[in-house]
Amino acid sequence: MKDLSSLMKQAQAMQEKVGQAQSELESLVLLGQAGDGLVKVTLKGTGQIIRVDIDDSLMRPGEAELVGDLVAAAHADAKRHLDARSAELMRKAAGPLAGMPGMPRF
């Protein structure tokens, strides 16, 4: 029974750490780039796009498709950074319980 009590305390501590990690994640601001920095997308930790910067050199007639592709690629880059940071924070929060059956994989 002592082991179960210890396990429950660990689970509660992990739950608190996961909550803290989620709060930290929500406050993050990440940058994704494409086209050697010609297009930049700034993403909040919630996944919301808060800014898109497009270099003036791309603002020419006939470049719309290229600009669209670069914006999508910059967003994907920012999302990769977000996913990596999220997994890192959650692994850290889960601590020794991270690999146990029934626990989410990060």
Image (tube, grey):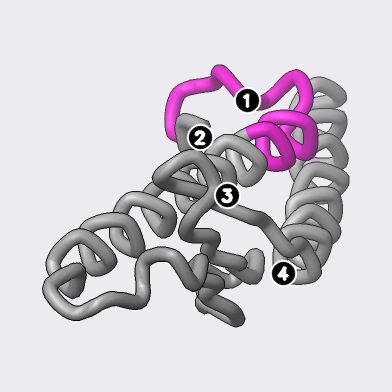
Specify which label sits upstream in the sequence, 4 or 3. 4
Q: Quadrant of residue 60?
A: bottom left
In magenta segment, residue 98: yes
Query: In this rendering, which labeled residue sits more in front, label 2 or label 4?
Result: 4
Residue 59, position as x, y percentages in the image? 35, 76
Query: In this rendering, which labeled residue sits more in front, label 1 or label 3?
Result: 3
In this figure, which residue is indicated by the disc labeled 1? 98
How would you rate the neighbour count of disc 2 (Cα within 10 Å): few for under 14, some for 14-19, many for 20 or more? few
Secondary structure at badge 4 equals helix
- What amino acid is at disc 3? Leu
Q: Are marks 1 and 3 in contact (CB under 8 Å)?
A: no
Q: Are marks 2 and 4 in contact (CB under 8 Å)?
A: no
Residue 77, position as x, y percentages in the image? 45, 45
How would you rate the neighbour count of disc 4 (Cα within 10 Å): few for under 14, some for 14-19, many for 20 or more? some
Mark 4–mark 3 Cα distance, whole angstroms, equals 10 Å
Residue 64 disc label: none
In this figure, which residue is indicated by the disc labeled 2? 103
Magenta segment boundaries in residue numbering:
88-102
Residue 82 disc label: 3
Secondary structure at badge 3 equals helix
Mark 2–mark 1 Cα distance, whole angstroms, equals 6 Å
In this figure, which residue is indicated by the disc labeled 4? 26
- What amino acid is at disc 4? Glu
